[in-house]
Image: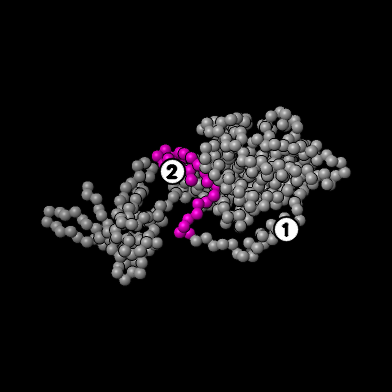
Amino acid sequence: MPKSVYQYKPKSASPGVGNISPNVGNSRLVQNVPKAEDQTPKQVDLHSVMVPDLGDDFPSLSTCSKSSAKSIRSIQSTCGDEENSSSSTISCRVLDDVTPIKKEPSLIGSSGFQDGRFSQEVDIGSEGSRGNGEFDKSDGQQKEHSYDICLKRTANVVKLKSPLFAMNREKRNEMKRLTEGENIKILRPGMVLLKGYLPLTDQVKLIRSCRDLGQGSGGFYQPSYRDGAKLHLRMMCLGKNWDPETSEYGDERPIDGAKPPPIPAEFQQLVRGAIQSSHNYLDSNSKMKIAKTILPPMSPNICIVNFYAKTGKLGLHQDKDESPESLRKGLPVVSFSIGDSAEFLYGDERDIEKAEKVLLESGDVLIFGGKSRHIFHGVSSIIPDTTPKALEEETNLRPGRLNLTFREY
């Protein structure tokens, strides 16, 4: 059966080329109908022909000049599976220098794609954030090779900067922190919160380092438990790998054999500084210099980096997979929060109703060790759109929360 070729002929009076649709305005498509024995080619007005609704799948030519859009070939084909045999797929190829804008399938939460062909839970984040994992559409399985915690900057998209007053407010808060010193709170014995401890410059460096590490070997992936349930976050391990399926540490990641990248020296320096600041505060507020007894010192050789999307969360749990000696000494866990704020739960029991709650904001450092080393803790929710504007504009961090937890095995 001969293929039909549709040719779009824009009016000479048109000021430019917009979104072309067979059913809009006075557009005309000329169809070359195959000749019969005694017939000549006829022009058919496709306004009278039933054409499938292309919706947003038709390529946008709004950025192209009128002379660039010379012709478009449109080929109709039906889907291979019986369930969707009544639907059709339109694939378009624009000739010369016109390049159609490819539209990716939209996501509905974390349950799969909108057209229902993919039902695997992928939970790759926030609205408008699809990561950069690869997908094999032939079998509906996700084959993710890397995950970028920062959105890619698009040259054609103009992003408005934050209002000047908002930027100035963030700068004033930064200067206040530097002049007044650390804002430290004792939540319970052995549990210290350093509010705004990480300055903006260090947060930017942490994001960029995690982004580079996360896209390499042993980088971000979506882990799962033994029963196959997916964690609502992306994870990367540094120093040693922690496997949520076995709750054990190892030198390689079981899913792909990748070795965890080493912990950057800059990360370790920030951890030691946070612990020392806590010791100084505890000693200055106590007649007895017993800060190291309340909160033992620690040299991290493990870092678990989690990225929570807008809907990310983590149930109440204990960090108890380190060595018996580390747990016996109460060597602390040091947690860095960057990006969106999070509601952090903690308590002596695995009971949400009895757990206490504290808001962790970008730049906060939370330390729990000593008597608080075995507390149950988790993240109940992420507060959307709370990333500092200056940090967002500097890094283009995805909507969500970047969390680094350090510990000594």
Overall secondary structure of the magenta section: loop
Name the image quarter holding residue 321.
Answer: top right
- Please tell me which residue is depicted at 51% across the width and 32% down the height of the picture: 256
Quadrant housing the C terminus: top right
**Amino acid residing under circle 2:** Arg
| Residue count near mark 1 (Cα–Cα under 10 Å), binned few <14, some 14–19, many ≥20 | few
In front of the other: 229 or 129 = 129
The residue under the point 47% across, 50% down is 106
Q: Is residue 282 shown above or below 32?
A: above
What residue does disc 1 label?
176
Residue 131 percent location from the top left of the image: 50, 46
Q: Is residue 35 above or below residue 214?
A: below
Whether residue 4 sits left or right of residue 357 in the image: it is left
For mark 2, give the secondary structure. loop
Res 375 seen here: no
Residue 80 belongs to magenta span: no
